Amino acid sequence: MASEWYPFILTDSVTVSANGTGTLELSIGATEEFEGASIHFLSTGSFQITSIKDSGGKPYTDADSTNVIDSTLFTTSRSQNKGVQDFYAKLQLVPNTTLFIDVKDTSGSSNTIRCYIIGKKRSI
């Protein structure tokens, strides 16, 4: 029987060199499921998202190296937290799934990119 849902924030960070690439990896365990409501980024410089897919190969965007999601898309607050306030549909990650977000630095210097997906999790 599944447990009650509880608030949970999935997190990961990656440091990329100037104009370099990296991958954020946000994972759910084999006996857990996660439902995300919003995604937020905090970075030391500008970046682009070139792909979002899960470990099963399901794409969550059609972005690629020539058609990117630029970090300037995300709203900016005084804390430089860049985020999309809400997903149009909840992000559902089934047990034993990893979400991969491929990023590319565009700031021209080393860049640490942090990702936070705010939602809820439960054991099943």
Image (cartoon, grey):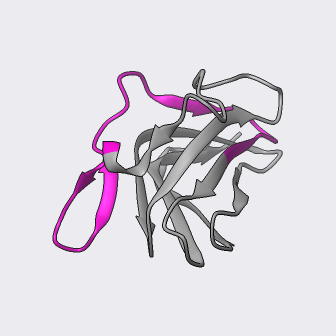
Horizontal side of 83 relative to 29 (left or right) equals left
Relative to 54, say whether 113 is above or below.
below
Work out whether residue 1 can be spotted: no
Residue closer to the observer: 33 or 5? 33
Q: Is residue 25 magenta?
A: no
Horizontal side of 67 relative to 123 (left or right) equals left
Q: Position of residue 8 (x, y in %)?
A: 49, 57
Q: Is residue 91 magenta?
A: yes
Quarter of image, res 55: top right
**Going by the picture, which residue comes out furthest to the left?**
78
What residue do we see at 81% from left, 26% from top?
Answer: 57
**Going by the picture, which residue comes out furthest to the front?**
108
Residue closer to the observer: 93 or 41? 41
What residue do we see at 18% from left, 63% from top?
Answer: 77
Relative to 107, say whether 40 is above or below.
above
Residue closer to the observer: 57 or 104? 104
Quarter of the rendering occupied by the C terminus: top right
Q: Position of residue 65 (x, y in %)?
A: 66, 36
Work out whether residue 26 can be spotted: yes
Quarter of image, res 89: top left
Q: Which residues are magenta?
A: 73-101
